[in-house]
Image: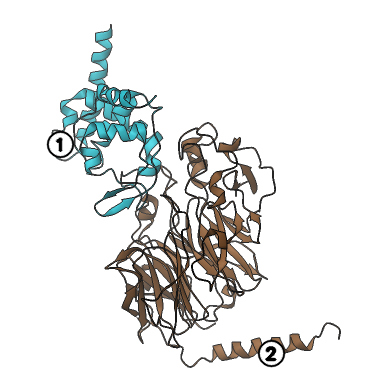
């Protein structure tokens, strides 16, 4: 039964993707298409983004000038996954500079999110707004959380 | 006859005389608006031109009685934090110089001095008979060591007519939570920020090297004020507060996204010494017309605040970020604008996922020194389009306001550094 459900979920995810692909004039092979688990994670991550992140980082991931950093093709997003997960779990109190612009608003810790939610939302961010990068795994988030003070 | 004081008569005729002088000013240039009114949407009879493209983050601006424009940059550009622009016959202006190696927001002209602020200090520079800064290298440090955090850093400034300088010191927090901007985090009792920020401080306008101990906390409970001006009609300080953010983000059990997009109000306050506008304990709900208890301090979106807090003089929809306030005292614009307030709304970010709003200059009518009647959008389309406004991706963002000697309204843009000038050309 468990296998059956998993198969159903995979088939559903695949169906959604092929539906989306129909609207594209020249469908490209994306990482998500090759990996249904990643596609499902991105889908769940989009919900987390809308509930938690969108206010500051905005619907287009472009952030807010001088305050909240953009999530578009920056090293913070595309680079070291552990550093990225740490920002979500522990917050970021220090101002950061991206392309000569300062972003100063304090990012609160989002440690009430589950490891799965953090993995999903980061996988979503790393594959949205023009970004394309590997998925963040639950185990990677769990490892970062283990390093934080309780 | 008891009511007919000869002194009053004298004053009235003096005012009439100076008005007549202004109306017949032979030096008033004829200023031609840009063919597209600088991209702005304006009421009938008004036109606009782009005076200059400074390329810097133009925060507040000031115009001397001789028409020299001074622009405070948020970030130093080519080593300069203040730009000097001289007018040309066409009504446009040229950047002719710059000085002050610090970024900031405050810029104000009064009685022969240019006042400027960094995020820590306030300075002044002597103006000569031509309205120009005589010695840019000899700025006088008036106030130093003001608190600054990583939000609400601007130290906006204005002067009264009695030699006092008023400085906003913004609260370096959203709502004084134990963990700033964190979901469910409670407010700190007796918010410790308020002893040195979250209010307006009063200093002497002509005394060097002042610190907190030389100043007075004039009014408190103001989260962050960027736009402020002295109302000459009722001789009183008016400020525009940036209301708190993230009601739904941090208290989803009490507020939904739609409520959080419009609440709380951006408030105009008429201040007297000792006033308390209630931050972080309260916020103003412009839909219910009530001062509410903040959710960090036991509120639930329904509970009214208890305590002696100042009610706003006027209230505007949430998160639109009022960065400039100017009482219009000129004679160029039609009579309804005289002594009313222009407000530059920098534009929102904290309405997502709802559409963003603002990015315009509003007019608030005043009668006898008090707000009277509904506010209206005066200059719109700084953003470039309705879609750019909704997305929060504005081309230009209005910030500072100043009145020129002929009664033109100057508007600065801290996104691309455009300086706008709005004129009235139709017959009154």
Q: Residue A83: which quarter of the image?
A: top left
Q: Is residue A81 left or right of residue B72?
A: left
Can I make out residue B365 in this image?
yes
Q: Distance between the Cα atoms at labels 1 and 2?
A: 79 Å
Q: Nearer the viewer, residue B217 or A45?
A: B217
Q: Is residue B258 left or right of residue A141?
A: right
Q: Residue A90: which quarter of the image?
A: top left
Please give the name of the residue rendered at 63% of the width and 55% of the height, measured from the top-left corner: B312
Which residue ends up furthest to the right in the rendered image? B2
Relative image position of residue B113 (x, y in whole percent): 48, 78
Relative image position of residue B53 (x, y in whole percent): 31, 71
The dot on residue B381 is: none
- Which chain contains the residue that carries disc 2? B
Please give the name of the residue rendered at 42% of the width and 48% of the height, measured from the top-left corner: B355
Q: Is residue B16 left or right of residue B247?
A: right
Which lettered chain is shown in brown? B
For mark 1, what is the residue?
A27
Please give the name of the residue rendered at 19% of the width and 29% of the height, measured from the top-left corner: A32
Q: Is residue B345 above or below residue B140?
A: above
For mark 2, what is the residue?
B13
Colour that chain A carries in the picture: cyan
Can I make out residue B325 in this image?
no
Determine whether the residue tagged by mark 2 lies in a helix, strand or loop: helix
Q: Disc 1 or disc 2, which is closer to the eye?
A: 2
Relative image position of residue B234 (x, y in whole percent): 66, 70
Q: Quadrant of the N terminus of chain B?
A: bottom right
Relative image position of residue B306 (x, y in whole percent): 69, 42
Task: Check if mark 1's residue and mark 2's residue have beta carbons within 8 Å.
Answer: no
């Amino acid at each position: 039964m468990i296998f059956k459900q998993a198969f159903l979920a995979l088939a559903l995810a695949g169906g959604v993707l092929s539906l989306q692909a129909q609207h594209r004039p020249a469908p490209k092979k994306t990482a998500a298409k090759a990996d249904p688990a990643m596609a499902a994670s991105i889908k769940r991550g989009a919900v987390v983004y809308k509930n938690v992140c969108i206010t500051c980082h905005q619907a287009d991931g472009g952030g807010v000038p001088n305050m909240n950093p953009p999530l578009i093709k920056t090293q913070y997003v595309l680079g070291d996954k552990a550093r990225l997960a740490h920002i979500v779990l522990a917050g970021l109190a220090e101002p950061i500079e991206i392309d000569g612009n300062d972003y100063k608003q304090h990012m609160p810790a989002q440690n009430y999110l589950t490891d799965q939610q953090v993995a999903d939302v980061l996988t979503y961010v790393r594959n949205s707004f023009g970004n394309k990068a590997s998925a963040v795994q639950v185990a990677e988030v769990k490892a970062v959380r283990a390093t934080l003070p309780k | 006859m008891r009511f007919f004081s000869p002194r009053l008569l004298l004053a009235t005729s003096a005012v009439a005389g100076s008005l007549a002088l202004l109306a017949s000013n032979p030096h008033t240039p004829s200023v031609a608006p840009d063919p597209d009114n600088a991209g702005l949407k304006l009421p009938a009879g008004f036109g606009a031109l782009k005076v200059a493209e400074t390329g810097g983050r133009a925060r507040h601006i000031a115009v001397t009685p001789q028409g020299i424009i001074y622009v405070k940059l948020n970030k130093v550009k080519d080593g300069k934090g203040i730009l000097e622009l001289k007018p040309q016959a066409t009504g446009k202006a040229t950047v002719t110089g710059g000085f002050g190696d610090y970024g900031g927001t405050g810029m104000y002209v009064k009685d022969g001095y240019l006042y400027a602020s960094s995020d820590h200090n306030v300075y002044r520079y002597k103006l000569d008979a031509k309205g120009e800064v005589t010695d840019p290298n000899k700025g006088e440090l008036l106030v130093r060591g003001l608190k600054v955090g990583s939000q609400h850093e601007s130290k906006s400034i204005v002067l009264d007519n009695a030699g006092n300088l008023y400085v906003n010191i913004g609260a370096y927090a959203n709502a004084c939570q134990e963990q700033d901007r964190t979901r469910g985090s409670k407010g700190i009792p007796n918010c410790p920020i308020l002893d040195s920020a979250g209010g307006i401080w009063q200093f002497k306008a002509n005394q060097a090297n002042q610190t907190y101990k030389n100043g007075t906390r004039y009014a408190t409970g103001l989260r962050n004020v960027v736009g402020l001006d002295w109302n000459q009609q009722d001789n009183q300080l008016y400020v525009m507060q940036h209301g708190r953010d993230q009601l739904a983000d941090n208290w989803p059990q009490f507020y939904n996204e739609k409520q959080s997009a419009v609440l709380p109000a951006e408030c105009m306050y008429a201040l007297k010494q000792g006033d308390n506008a209630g931050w972080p304990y309260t916020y103003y709900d412009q839909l219910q017309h009530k001062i509410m208890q903040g959710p960090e301090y036991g509120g639930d979106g329904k509970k009214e605040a208890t305590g002696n807090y100042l009610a706003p003089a006027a209230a505007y929809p949430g998160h639109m970020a009022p960065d400039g306030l100017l009482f219009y005292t000129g004679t160029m614009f039609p009579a309804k604008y005289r002594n009313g307030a222009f407000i530059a709304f920098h534009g929102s970010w904290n309405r997502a996922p709802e559409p963003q709003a603002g990015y315009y200059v509003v007019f608030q009518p005043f009668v006898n020194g008090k707000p009277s009647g509904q506010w209206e959008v005066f200059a719109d389309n700084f953003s470039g389009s309705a879609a750019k406004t909704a997305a929060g991706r504005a081309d230009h963002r209005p910030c500072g306001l100043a009145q020129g000697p002929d009664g033109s309204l100057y508007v600065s843009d801290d996104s691309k550094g455009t300086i706008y000038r709005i004129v009235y050309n139709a017959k009154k």
